[in-house]
Image (cartoon, rainbow, N blue to C red):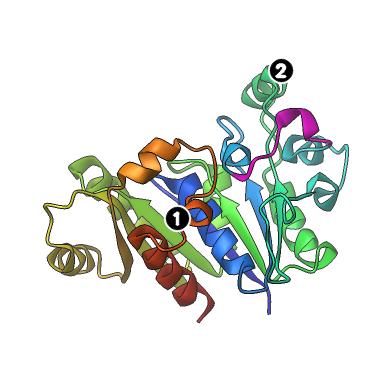
C-alpha cells in the first residue's frame, strides 16, 4: 500500500531538504518507486541536491497549480542520473525557480485543495510506493494539508532552544490532525553531546519517538548541497542512521 510521508521543520536551515533527498534515495535503493514533491514553493531547492537543472524543468508544481498540466506530467525521472541500480525509481516534482513564477505565487496564492487531489492522483499515475513531501518550514495552510493527509510525519530539528519550542508547537498540531506515525530526527548535533542522553531527553520532552540523532558532519558541509550525501558517503555514520530512519518509516 502506498504511503505519503511529509518531511517538515518549524524553521529553515534544519536540513529538511537534505533529509528528504537522502531518505528518498535510500528507499529507492530498496527497489521502491519514490516520488518527491517540493512544496517549498517560495524557496525551492531539492532539485539542486538531485541534480536537476532548472533549464530542464519541462513542467513544475507551479504549472499544475495553475491548471497547465497534471501533477504526474511535472515529474522528472531522476533514477538514471542518480545511478540507481536496484530497480527502484525516483521521480522529482520540482517547484519553479523562475523569479516571475515565485512572485506570482506570493502575490496570487493558489488553491491548496489542488494539492490533496494531486498527491492522491500522482500515487496512482506513477504507481508510487512512497510519496515524499518536502514542505515549507513553519505552519501555514499548505503545511497543515500535507501533515493532515500524511501516513507519516518526520520532524527535523536542531538541538537549540528555538527549534525545541517551535517543534513542540508542530507536534501539538500534528496530534490534533491525528497523524498515524510521528517521528523526530535531531540533526546537526555537536559531537560533545551524549547522543543517548539527548535522545532520552527529547523523547521525554515531546512524548514522541526520536528516530535518529544525526551528528554534525564536516563532510556534508563540504559537499555543500552538490549532491545526495548518502550517495557520496554510503558508509558514513550519518548515512547509516538515515537508513535506520528509512526502515522505521516503512515498518
Q: Residue at x 25, y 70 (%)?
A: 207
Q: Is residue 126 above or below residue 144?
A: below
- In the image, which residues are magenta? 50-58
Q: Is residue 81 above or below residue 234?
A: above
Q: Position of residue 20 (x, y in %)?
A: 52, 53
Task: Judge whether residue 34 can be spotted in this image.
Answer: yes
Q: Secondary structure at mark 2?
A: helix
Left or right position of 68 against 175: right
Left or right position of 177 against 128: left
Q: Position of residue 202 (x, y in %)?
A: 21, 62
Q: Which residue is mark 2?
A: 100
Classed neighbour count for the residue bearing mark 1: other residues with Cα under 10 Å, few (<14), some (14–19), many (≥20) = some
Q: Which residue is mark 1?
A: 233
Q: Nearer the viewer, residue 92 or 166?
A: 92
Q: Quadrant of the N terminus?
A: bottom right
Task: Judge whether residue 183 can be spotted in this image.
Answer: no
Q: Residue at x 58, y 41 (%)?
A: 46
Amino acid at each position: 500500500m502506498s504511503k505519503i510521508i511529509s518531511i517538515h521543520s518549524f524553521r529553515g536551515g534544519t536540513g529538511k531538504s537534505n533529509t528528504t533527498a537522502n531518505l528518498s534515495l535510500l528507499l529507492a535503493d530498496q527497489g521502491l518507486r519514490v516520488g518527491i514533491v517540493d512544496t517549498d514553493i517560495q524557496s525551492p531547492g531539492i532539485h539542486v541536491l538531485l541534480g536537476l537543472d532548472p533549464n530542464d524543468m519541462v513542467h513544475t508544481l507551479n504549472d499544475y497549480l495553475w491548471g497547465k498540466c497534471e501533477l504526474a506530467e511535472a515529474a522528472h525521472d531522476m533514477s538514471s542520473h542518480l545511478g540507481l541500480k536496484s530497480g527502484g525509481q525516483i521521480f522529482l516534482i520540482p517547484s519553479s525557480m523562475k523569479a516571475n513564477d515565485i512572485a506570482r505565487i506570493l502575490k496570487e496564492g493558489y488553491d491548496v485543495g489542488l494539492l490533496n487531489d494531486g498527491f492522491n492522483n500522482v500515487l496512482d499515475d506513477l504507481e508510487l510506493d512512497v510519496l515524499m513531501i518536502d514542505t515549507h518550514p513553519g505552519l501555514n495552510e499548505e503545511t497543515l494539508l500535507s501533515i493532515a493527509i500524511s501516513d507519516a510525519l518526520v520532524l527535523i530539528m536542531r538541538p537549540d532552544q528555538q527549534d525545541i519550542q517551535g517543534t513542540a508547537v508542530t507536534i501539538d498540531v500534528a496530534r490534533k490532525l491525528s497523524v498515524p506515525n510521528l517521528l523526530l530526527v535531531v540533526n546537526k548535533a555537536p559531537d560533545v553531546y551524549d547522543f543517548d542522553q539527548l535522545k532520552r531527553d527529547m523523547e521525554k520532552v515531546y512524548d514522541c519517538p526520536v528516530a535518529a540523532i544525526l551528528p554534525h558532519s564536516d563532510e556534508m558541509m563540504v559537499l555543500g548541497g552538490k549532491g545526495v550525501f548518502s550517495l557520496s558517503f554510503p558508509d558514513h555514520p550519518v548515512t547509516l542512521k538515515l537508513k535506520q530512519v528509512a526502515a522505521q518509516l516503512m515498518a
